[in-house]
Image (cartoon, helix red, strand yellow):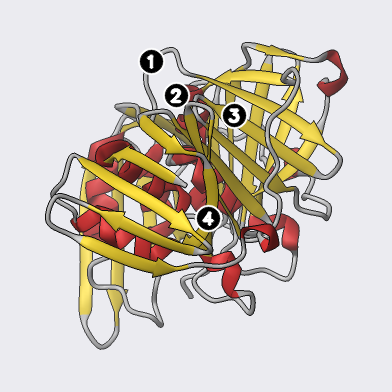
Amino acid sequence: MKVNFNRAALAEALNLLISVVPGRTPKPILRCLKIVASGKVVQMCATDMEAGINYTVSEVQIETPGEVVIPADKLAAIVRESIDEVLCLTAEEGTCKITGSDSRFTIYGHDAGQYPAVPCFEGDADMEVSLLNLQSGIERCLFATAKESTRYALNGVLWEIKGKKLILVATDGRRLVRTKMSIIKADKSLEKAKMIVPAKTMALMDKIGSSDGEVVKIKLMDNQILIRCGDVVISSNLVDGNFPKYEDIIPSGYDKKLTLKTDSMLSAVKRASLLTSEESRGIKLALNKNSMILSGRAPETGDAKIDMQVEYNGDPIEIGFNPQFFIDVLRVIGDEEFDLELGDSDRPGLVKCGTNFLCVLMPINLG
């Protein structure tokens, strides 16, 4: 194999591909990329056996077709530090040589025949959605997934198709986010379909370079989801398990409602949390007529109190929240204002932004 790569295009491909390469694995070959040169393009793929990426690089000049499997981190480091516009990769008998204007590297690879198959996207899509909309939805919900949970369903994001809307739901048991977006088109067989997509796969989708008008094509096969956008195909196993009945968790009928400036509330929550500690990680929100006070305290450190003027004429209430959970949701709202709805002090708080986004925050007991 002998291929001349545009270094910038190769670097862009590697930035995404190495995201799926496992840092530790009993199978050394999984720490590698498979590179196949044929026709006028180069296919590069990576997998951790749960998720995979196929990336087509077209800014190449193929002199000799072929294939090679080489360590991803070594190739990425060489390309990242290179000062050349063009890099030449030659491979023979499992050895890859990378040549620049003043540099020559030799990397020892693996048998290409031993590399696991990474699915390609073939046939028509089951669903299409705008990449910008999908990435916006991912950023609005991914933070609420459980990082490590024995309830595997909480480690992913629920996808639910209802009519012309794709609904994404994430929860870690202490907070829940639901966001909606329009679908360009979807197969009738997907109506009312539900699936749980791993958080890692969602994060991969968020890393795809986006531009106006870019469309994501989605296909379901057995227990896998395939996502194609431009030159990138992401494949992933779906999460087994039952996602909580999120409709039962979202409160309704609250009588304490107010509209707040996102930036002002974010600043107030941050400042109120400055003097909290590991033992007293909560902040108190005290709501009275046209006034809201956010306070935090730690016995060994001191206390903080932030006054905010608000438009509110409901009953007084005091309620405790984890400040980091509040900060997380305020960072992703993306609008200048949001609605806060409260019930009793032992019931969840509800953050809303328009009709397509809401977050349920469980209260905490401040003692």
Q: Which of labels 4 and 1 is toward the front?
A: 4
Residue drawn 46% across the image and 71% down it: 366
Please state which amino acid type lies under the numbered disc 4.
Val
Q: Residue 132 carries which label?
A: 2
Which element is circle 3 on?
strand
Q: Is mark 4 on a helix, strand or loop?
A: strand
Q: Position of residue 111 (x, y in %)?
A: 62, 65
Q: Is residue 126 left or right of residue 310?
A: right
Sequence order check, earlier mark of 2 and 1 = 2
Q: For this rendering, which residue is in front, 185 or 86?
A: 86
- State the separation of the CA atoms marked 4 and 1: 35 Å
Which numbered marker is on residue 212?
1
Q: Distance between the residues labelled 4 and 3?
A: 24 Å
- The residues tagged by marks 2 and 4 sit, at their Cα atoms, a distance apart of 34 Å
Label 2 crowding class (10 Å Cα cut-off): few <14, some 14-19, many 20+? Answer: some
Disc 4 crowd, CA 10 A, few/some/many (<14, 14-19, 20+): many
Disc 3 target residue: 228
Name the one closer to the observer, 160 or 21: 21
